[in-house]
Image (spheres, rainbow, N blue to C red):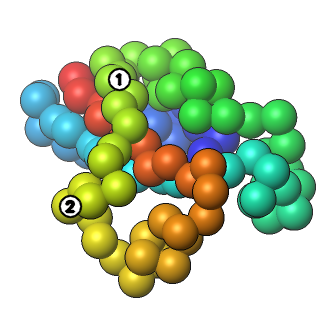
Amino acid sequence: MRPDPSFLERLRATCSDSGRIEVVTAVHAEADASELARLGLVGHSLETAADGWRSAGLDLAVEPLDPGHEYQTTWWRKIRQREGRVASRLIATW
């Protein structure tokens, strides 16, 4: 989830004048600690990711998702049982 401003700027440039990107995540700092460390994302959070997207010039909203949200993937069905796991959606527009 570490934002790369140059990538986000290029992504934005490939889209129409009024684009929208949605990212759904359910990262849990404690439960995902080893994977976050492997990816070099220790200390990163949804808030720091959102700040990075905003710094690339995107308007961003972050909202929690109800457990019964529309993204009922196999992955979500497996991890939603874990205590403290909350899905969130980042909506970037320009």
Answer yes or no: is residue 75 visible. yes
Q: How many marks?
A: 2
Amino acid marked by disc 2: Glu
Residue 68 appears at what percent x and percent y? 26, 59
Other-residue count near label 1 (Cα within 10 Å), few / some / many at <14 / 14–19 / ≥20: some
Which numbered disc covers residue 89?
A: none
Residue located beneath label 2 in the image = 70
Q: Judging from the image, what secondary structure is the residue with disc 1 in?
A: strand
Disc 1 to disc 2, C-alpha distance: 20 Å
Residue 15: where, in percent of width, then height?
20, 42
Residue drawn where x is 38% and y is 37% of the image: 64
Q: Is residue 88 above or below residue 32?
A: above
Give 85 or 24, whichever is nearer the viewer.
85
Residue at x-position 61% and y-position 64%: 82
Q: In the image, 66: left or right of 39?
A: left
Query: Which image quadrant for residue 52?
Result: top right
Question: Which is nearer the eye, 5 or 72?
Answer: 72
Identify the residue at horizontal 33%, vertical 44% (top origin): 65
Q: Amino acid at mark 1?
A: Leu
Q: Residues within 10 Å of mark 2 (few under 14, many from 20)?
A: few
Judge from the rendering whether residue 22 lies leftward or rightward of residue 83; answer left or right: left
Q: Determine which residue is flagged by label 1.
A: 60
Asked if the residue under mark 2 is in contact with the one under mark 1, i.e. CB atoms within 8 Å, the reply is no
For image coordinates 51% across by 79% down, the residue present is 78
User: Can residue 4 be seen in the rendering of this structure?
Assistant: no
Q: Nearer the viewer, residue 36 or 74?
A: 74
